[in-house]
Image (cartoon, helix red, strand yellow):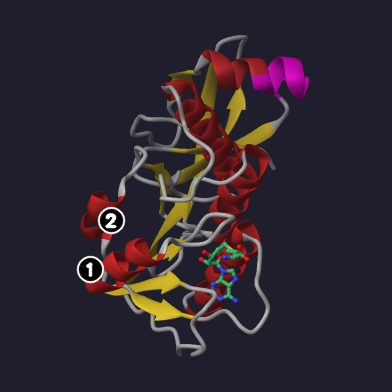
């Protein structure tokens, strides 16, 4: 069943004007009419069934007491990597339940976000993935961060995935966790040192060197397995 997000607070039995993008998707893409029931998630993360009553409005029906969010607040600091790989990561991490993604301009990132269009594009990818996976929240896509900014994204548990590290840490994630994934060329040594000095504990993901996107998905899946 299709889900949409609205920035408003809604209640059962209300008649609402729908956003043009939602109307376009329902009527032109899915070709649905009033008999189709969809999910509408409000700004508090509460989900309702709803159906169209005319070309611009819907009526909300029953409230679904459903929370599909994880018990742990996850922040992924993801180095800028090749566009389509970065976008794939945004989609997959959203499906898995990540709360915040911080694009990171690592020393060896060859990719740059030259203007805001790129951020807008990945925010749209996160929105669509959150709809698709029936999340109650759309993950926050933060502004591009530099090394000096990484301190402010720290959680209760903080990790940096480092391919030269030998120890497979026993990951702890009660409450909140932040983790950093390096770019295709890996971390610069000074950069890595600064990151660990900020309090990020280095972890290995095994003997094989993974692509950044595989590393991000693998690490997230591990945490998700512990805090469904
Ligand atoms: N420096 C490597 C590739 C880096 S892989 C090279 O050029 O060969 C990209 C990122 O994925 C790394 O910076 C790291 O954050 C993560 N990563 C990949 N494999 C990993 C592993 N086995 N353990 C921990 N992190 C890993």
Residue 70 located within the stretch drawn in magenta: no
Secondary structure under tag 2 reads helix
* Residue 48 in sight: yes
Q: Position of residue 64 (x, y in %)?
A: 50, 51
Q: Which residue is mark 2?
A: 150
Q: Position of residue 191 (x, y in %)?
A: 34, 61
The span from disc 2 to disc 1 (Cα, nearest Å) is 8 Å
Residue 30 located within the stretch drawn in magenta: yes
* Residue in view at x 52 percent, y 81 percent: 204
* Residue in view at x 22 percent, y 59 percent: 151
Q: Nearer the viewer, residue 205 or 155?
A: 205
Q: Nearer the viewer, residue 75 or 131?
A: 75
Q: Nearer the viewer, residue 28 or 129?
A: 129
Q: Residues within 10 Å of mark 1 (few under 14, many from 20)?
A: some
Q: Residues within 10 Å of mark 2 (few under 14, many from 20)?
A: some
Q: Quadrant of residue 28?
A: top right
Q: Position of residue 170 (x, y in %)?
A: 45, 90
Determine the quadrant in which ligand 1 lies: bottom right
Residue at the right extreme, as displayed:
31
Q: Nearer the viewer, residue 92 or 38?
A: 92
Badges 2 and 1: C-beta atoms under 8 Å apart? yes
Q: Position of residue 106 (x, y in %)?
A: 42, 50
Q: Which residue is mark 1?
A: 198
* Residue 49 in sight: no
Secondary structure under tag 1 reads loop
Magenta-tinted stretch: 25-34
């Amino acid at each position: 069943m299709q889900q949409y997000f609205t920035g408003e607070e809604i209640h059962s039995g209300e008649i609402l004007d729908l956003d043009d993008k939602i109307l376009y998707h329902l009527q032109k893409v899915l070709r649905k009419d009033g008999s189709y029931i969809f999910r509408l998630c409000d700004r508090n993360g509460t989900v309702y069934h709803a159906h169209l009553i005319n070309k611009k409005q819907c009526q909300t029906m029953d409230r679904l007491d459903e929370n599909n969010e994880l018990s742990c607040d996850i922040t992924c600091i993801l180095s800028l990597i090749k566009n389509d790989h970065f976008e794939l990561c945004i989609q997959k991490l959203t499906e898995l339940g990540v709360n915040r993604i911080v694009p990171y301009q690592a020393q060896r990132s060859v990719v740059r976000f030259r203007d805001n269009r790129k951020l807008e594009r990945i925010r749209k990818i996160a929105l669509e993935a959150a709809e698709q996976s029936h999340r109650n929240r759309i993950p926050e896509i933060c502004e591009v961060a530099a090394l000096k900014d990484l301190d402010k994204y720290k959680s209760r548990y903080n990790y940096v995935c480092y391919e030269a590290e030998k120890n497979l840490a026993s990951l702890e994630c009660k409450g909140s966790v932040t983790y950093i994934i390096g770019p295709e060329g890996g971390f610069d040594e000074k950069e890595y040192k600064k990151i660990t000095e900020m309090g990020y504990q280095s972890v290995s993901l095994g003997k094989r060197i993974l692509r950044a996107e595989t590393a991000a998905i693998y690490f997230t899946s591990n945490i998700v397995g512990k805090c469904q």
